[in-house]
Structures are given as C-alpha cells and as structure tokens.
Image: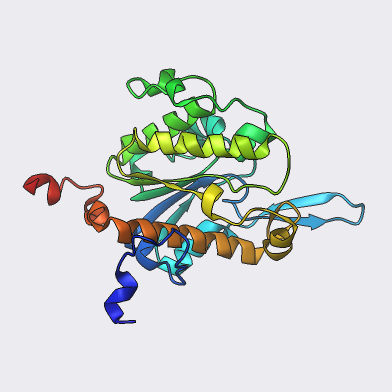
Amino acid sequence: MRPEEMYLFDPSEKPLDRMTECGGFSGIFRRIGCIGDSLAAGEFESKRADGSTGFHDMLTYSWGSYIGRDTGADIVNMGRDLMTAEEFVTSYGDSMKFFDPAAACQAYIVALGVNDLFTKGGELGSIADFRPDDPERSAKNFAGYYGRLLSRLKAISPRCRLFLVSMPRQECEGAWNPTVEAHRDLLVEMTGLFSHSYVLDLTEYFPVQNDEIRKLIYTGSHFNPMGYMYVARCFESYIDWYIRRSPRDFAEVPFIGTDLSYYEVIK
C-alpha cells in the first residue's frame, strides 16, 4: 500500500471496514463533547457479598476518555447514569453549564435513547414532533427533547459537527429491535434538519448483541474495559470514514467558533 492510500476513500468501503488504532482523522477535532448515559460515564458493575449489584462510574474508562487518549483531544464528558434526552435538556445540561458558550465544542457525540425508550418507557415520537422554528415548544417525547438538545448545541456552536449514535440490535425477540430501528431512522431524519450532522449507525454496523459478544465486551449489563475501548475505536473509525468520504465537509473544522471561512467565500 502506498502511503497516500491509507487516506483515500474507497466507495465500496463500509463505515467500520477500516478500524483505526490512533483515532484516524477523528483527531482533527480538538474539543469533543460526549453526551450519553452510563456507558458514556464508563460505568462498571460489581457484586457484593449479599448478591446485590454495585454500579460505579469511572470516567477514565469511558469511551470518551479512550477517544481523548487516542486523539489527544480535549474531551468534555457529559455522561451520567440513566441519562435521558429529557433530563439533559430540561435540567442536567443547564445545571452543569453545558449549554454555556464557554463550554462549546467543535464536535459532539450524542448517544441517548436506551433509558428514554426502554428503561423509562417513553414515547419515541416522530420528526414532526420537533419544531425547528420554535424548538422549546416541541412535543414532550424523545423526538421533541432530542431535537431541542441538538438545537441548543447548535445555538452555542453553530458550526459544530454532530455525530448521532444509534443503538445496536439485540439477538432477541419482541419489540426491542423494531424500536431500535425506528430510533435510528429518526436520527437519520434529524440530520436533515441540522447542518453538519451525521449518524453513527451502530444498528447496521455494530455487532449484534448476543451471548458471544457479551462474553467479550460486557460485565453484567455494562461494558468491560475492553468493551469501552472497542466502542471508542468504532466511533473514531466511523468518524474517520465520514471525513475521508467527504473531506471538504471537514476542511473548516479549525474555523469552528470563529467568523473565518474559505468555501463560504468562494462558493
């Protein structure tokens, strides 16, 4: 392989066909916000002598922290156990000052939905439930709160890149996978409403969650250290794939947060 070939994009290449080991081109982002639930917080499970389960957030093992170590980027970890889009946009984000201009990031990886739709049994809704013209009056369901969240991120960092994470399929029967697929489809529709937004489609490209995979990357219902590292590498590789596919879309990343431009001037 010639040196330049590692940077070129093959139209037949799928997002996780080429796994990076040091972040690839995801390293062009120097400040990344990581929004999510217990998996974003690096949660581990322990067992007590009485058989009960302990839950422990260890941010240094979160997928965001691995991305930071791989790329050298400044990571703003916004993950917390049981987080939902509703809680983040109505209380948590403000209480932690994540929506303050001083907290603005060049890119955000947003991994929410499991607790909204499964743990708390909320309604998914549809793209019609989000009001781009008046986000704060959107419907009180996942679609409405998620749209509000993205709007508030764009308000403090208009040129940021948004990477929206869908959920992997499970090897199971019932309503889980159809809901996961509907969630992914909603995220795809959201990218039509927000500039520079992209779906990290784990529904399609991440391994189906079965007993074999769980033995490798899980302890209980959360990842083990290798699992968190693997997910980080998947996110980095997926973002690298997007950048190599459309380099012009990312050429002005250093100008995020400024009034500088190149292509906007010469178009």
The vertical placement of 227 against 85, above or below, is below
Instruction: Name the side, left or right, on which 183 lies relative to 218.
Output: left
Q: Residue furthest bottom?
A: 2
- Identify the image quadrant of the N terminus: bottom left
Q: Quadrant of residue 103?
A: top left
Residue 163 x/y as whole percent: 42, 47
Say how the picture is coloured.
rainbow
User: What residue lies at 49% left-to-right and 48% top-to-bottom?
Assistant: 201
- Identify the image quadrant of the C terminus: top left
Residue 10 x/y as whole percent: 34, 64
Instruction: Name the side, left or right, on which 224 lies relative to 187.
Output: right
Instruction: Name the side, left or right, on which 150 lies relative to 230.
Output: left
Is residue 78 something that shows in the picture?
A: no
Q: Residue furthest front?
A: 12
Q: How many marks?
A: 0
User: What residue lies at 32% left-to-right and 21% top-to-bottom?
Assistant: 133
Residue 160 x/y as whole percent: 32, 46
Q: Quadrant of residue 237?
A: bottom left
Taking depth in this image into account, of 147 and 61 the one nearest to the observer is: 147
